[in-house]
Amino acid sequence: MSEEGKPGLLGQIKDRLIRSKERTAAEGRHITGSPDRGHERRLPPGQHLVEKWPVLDLGIQPEVPLDEWRLVIDGAIEAPLTLTFDRFMALPQSHFVSDIHCVTTWSRYDNRWDGVSSRSILEMVKPKPEARHVIFHSYDGYTTNIALEAFAAPDVILAHSWEGERLTREHGGPVRMVVPQWYFWKSAKWVRRIEFSAVDRPGFWELRGYHNEGDPWTEQRYS
């Protein structure tokens, strides 16, 4: 905060971004009203293809050195654990190709990810019977929520690399979530904690007008 008690430049940028997103949600922009429930088309309704990968964040891109990065996995599970980056890289590695769809209407096909699959994580931590939801916590303070069944989908990955190269900071490195079946705001960048919960807890954008799930084919953009 400045001496006058006003937010600094980054705070002002973040506040403007939040207000803009809230207006977009309140106005229901980009919704076509023509859902594709059968996934007959590869491109979801209201989306357009891009070749480059746009950068979207809250105006903060945390710098997390690899030797300081930690991933805490806790909550309603039998075997909580904390991973260093070396331990994370020593886990069984998976390689997926998936499309990504951003709520801001861009989509990018055939993204190659390297990392640890969510199913490998589930095998290690063993969710308790009451676990129904998963909340992602990021190093920039961001949170988002998905159902346990969405986390357990076969193409969900904790990615450290994209297109054969380590994830850059701007795209969520060292490690980010990739949840291809939902809009990309559910794929938290700079992930630091995965919390399993018996109760649902909407995250940053879900509390500001975005849908609690986010299926691109049924246009679940906003609540």
Image (spheres, rainbow, N blue to C red):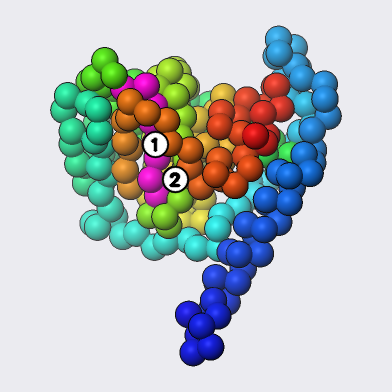
Is 205 or 52 nearer to us in this picture? 205
**Residue 30 shown left or right of residue 171 in the figure:** right
Q: Residue at x 42, y 30 (%)?
A: 200
Most common secondary structure along the magenta stretch: strand
Residue contact between numbered discs 1 and 2, judged by CB atoms under 8 Å: yes
Q: Residue at x 50, y 63 (%)?
A: 60
For this orientation, the residue located farthest to the bottom is 3
**Residue 220 shown left or right of residue 77 in the figure:** right
Label 1 residue SS: strand
- Residue 8 sits in quarter: bottom right
Q: Residue 88, how many percent across, how many down?
A: 25, 39
**Residue 190 shown left or right of residue 100 in the figure:** left
Q: Residue at x 52, y 37 (%)?
A: 186
The CA distance from mark 1 to mark 2 is 7 Å
The residue identified by callout 2 is 143
Magenta stretch in the rendered image: 131-138
Q: Residue 103, how many percent across, how many down?
A: 67, 39
Q: How many marks?
A: 2
Residue type beneath disc 1: Ile
Q: Is residue 154 above or below residue 172?
A: above
- Residue 222 magenta-highlighted: no
Q: Is residue 128 above or below residue 184?
A: above
- Residue 10 sits in quarter: bottom right
Which image quarter is the C terminus in? top right
Asked whether the viewer can see residue 110, the reply is: no
Residue type beneath disc 2: Thr
Q: Residue at x 43, y 18 (%)?
A: 149
Q: Residues within 10 Å of mark 1 (few under 14, many from 20)?
A: many
The residue identified by callout 1 is 135
